[in-house]
């Protein structure tokens, strides 16, 4: 029996810790293939930030569930990049702050938040060919994704990249402090009970510490072609 390619799930799952290069690599792979790009970290950042701003406690699962159900979340491609619009407000810049990252990490351990966002992510990936980046895409959101990549890099290199990002935003940061926060975030993300950060058994692990972005992108495009996803 032949399977129509258009009926196959066309999702490339890219997981890994903060600073491993997921966003840059995923966006470029998506652009090359003409796929939609979904940044699931941005979704957790939005929920954390909106909950914080509207005074919803992270201990109040019911209220967080309502917040997720009522959230009108859209990603819009603009000339200067991808914009994240939540309930009509452009939160693209706000969600990139260190504080929003911390809120995201804390709200992402709440089961009802994960349940709601995973459902949304599945609907997005099933609707169109997609490159989806996050922590649990290959393990939980799309365990049947035809290509799963787990990106990693040393804590020192990830701290260096994070400092450069913050610097570009005009925020100063102490490299040792950033490295400490990254190690702490890794620990929290990989030890939580629900969907801990870990590679799927069938994920291909790529260490980006000493690799160029172009090299990693080319590697993933080759794998995508080999698997008939690209
Ligand atoms: O990738 P990021 O830094 O934007 O992610 C922010 C936080 O959201 C991070 O601490 C882990 C969490 N997250 C998650 O739990 N699951 C995902 N699929 C994506 C992000």
Image (cartoon, rainbow, N blue to C red):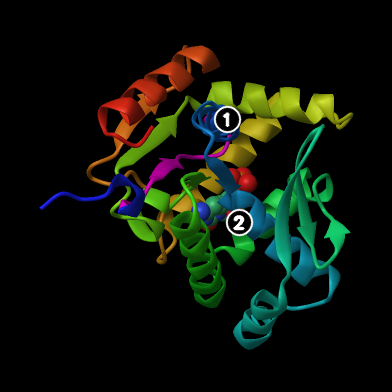
| Residue at 44 percent of width and 61 percent of height | 192
Q: Please identify the residue farthest to the left as the structure is shown.
A: 1
Q: Is residue 39 left or right of residue 135?
A: right
Residue located beneath label 1 in the image: 31
Q: Is residue 132 left or right of residue 223?
A: right
What secondary structure is marked by label 2?
A: helix
Q: Is residue 18 left or right of residue 222?
A: right
Q: Is residue 122 left or right of residue 120?
A: left
Residue 186 x, y percent position in the rendering: 50, 44
Q: Please identify the residue farthest to the bottom as the structure is shown.
A: 62
Q: Which mark is residue 105?
A: 2
State yes or no: Cβ of the residue under disc 2 lies below 8 Å from any atom of ligand 1: yes
| Most foreground residue, 219 or 125 | 125
Residue 41 x, y percent position in the rendering: 60, 50
| Residue at 29 percent of width and 39 percent of height | 203
Which region of the structure is painted magenta? 8-20
Mark 1 closeness class: few <14, some 14–19, many ≥20 residues within 10 Å:
few
What secondary structure is marked by label 1?
A: helix
| Alpha carbon separation for disc pair 1 and 2 | 28 Å
């Amino acid at each position: 029996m032949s399977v129509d390619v258009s009926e196959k799930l066309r999702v490339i799952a890219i997981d890994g810790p903060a600073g491993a290069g997921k966003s840059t690599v995923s966006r470029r792979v998506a652009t090359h293939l003409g796929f939609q790009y979904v940044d699931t970290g941005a979704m957790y950042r939005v929920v954390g930030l909106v909950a914080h701003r509207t005074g919803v406690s992270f201990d109040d699962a019911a209220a967080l569930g309502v917040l997720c159900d009522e959230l009108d979340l859209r990603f819009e491609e603009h000339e200067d990049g991808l914009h994240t619009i939540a309930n009509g407000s452009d939160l693209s810049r706000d969600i990139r702050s260190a504080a929003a990252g911390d809120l995201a990490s804390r709200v992402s351990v709440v089961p009802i938040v994960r349940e709601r966002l995973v459902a949304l992510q599945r609907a997005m990936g099933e609707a169109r060919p997609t490159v989806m980046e996050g922590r649990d895409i290959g393990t939980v959101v799309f365990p049947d994704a035809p290509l799963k990549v787990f990106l990693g890099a040393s804590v020192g290199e990830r701290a260096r990249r994070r400092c450069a990002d913050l610097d570009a935003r005009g925020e100063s940061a102490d490299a040792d402090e950033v490295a400490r926060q990254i190690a702490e975030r890794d620990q929290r993300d990989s030890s939580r009970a629900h969907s801990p950060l870990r590679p799927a058994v069938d994920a291909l692990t790529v260490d980006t510490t000493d690799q160029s972005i172009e090299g990693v992108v080319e590697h993933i495009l080759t794998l995508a072609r080999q698997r008939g996803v690209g």
